[in-house]
Amino acid sequence: MGAGTSAQGRHNTKKVHIPCRRCGRSAYHIRKGVCASCGYGKTAKFREYNWAKARE
Ligand SMILES: [Zn+2]
């Protein structure tokens, strides 16, 4: 196998998300340094949307 098309589909083998120290979910992106769930590393406030309420 070369490094052509056969390399596709192997991009998700390494872990990119580790448990976030703020929300506890495994959504902290290592490379970006941002939690996809609570926004840790990006915003001091808790990332929250109307369609994804963490709590009422
Ligand atoms: Zn988080």
Image (spheres, rainbow, N blue to C red):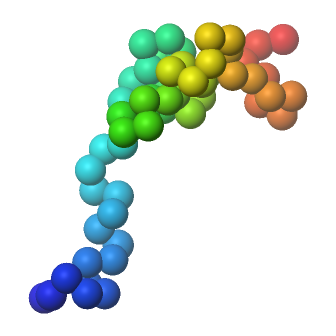
**Side (left or right) of 28 relative to 13:** right
Query: x, y percentage for residue 30?
Result: 36, 34
Question: In which quadrant is the N terminus drawn?
Answer: bottom left
- Which residue is found at the position 33% from the left and 63% from the top? 11
Query: x, y percentage for residue 17?
Result: 39, 37
Q: Residue furthest left?
A: 1
Question: In which quadrant is the C terminus drawn?
Answer: top right
- Which residue is found at the position 47% from the left and 17% from the top? 24
Query: x, y percentage for residue 16?
Result: 36, 42
**Side (left or right) of 2 relative to 43:** left
- Which residue is found at the position 15% from the left and 87% from the top? 2
Task: Answer above or below: position of 55 versus 19.
Answer: above
Task: Answer above or below: position of 15 versus 28.
Answer: below
Residue 30 versus residue 14: which sits nearer the camera? 30
- Which residue is found at the position 33% from the left and 77% from the top? 8
Query: x, y percentage for residue 40?
Result: 54, 19
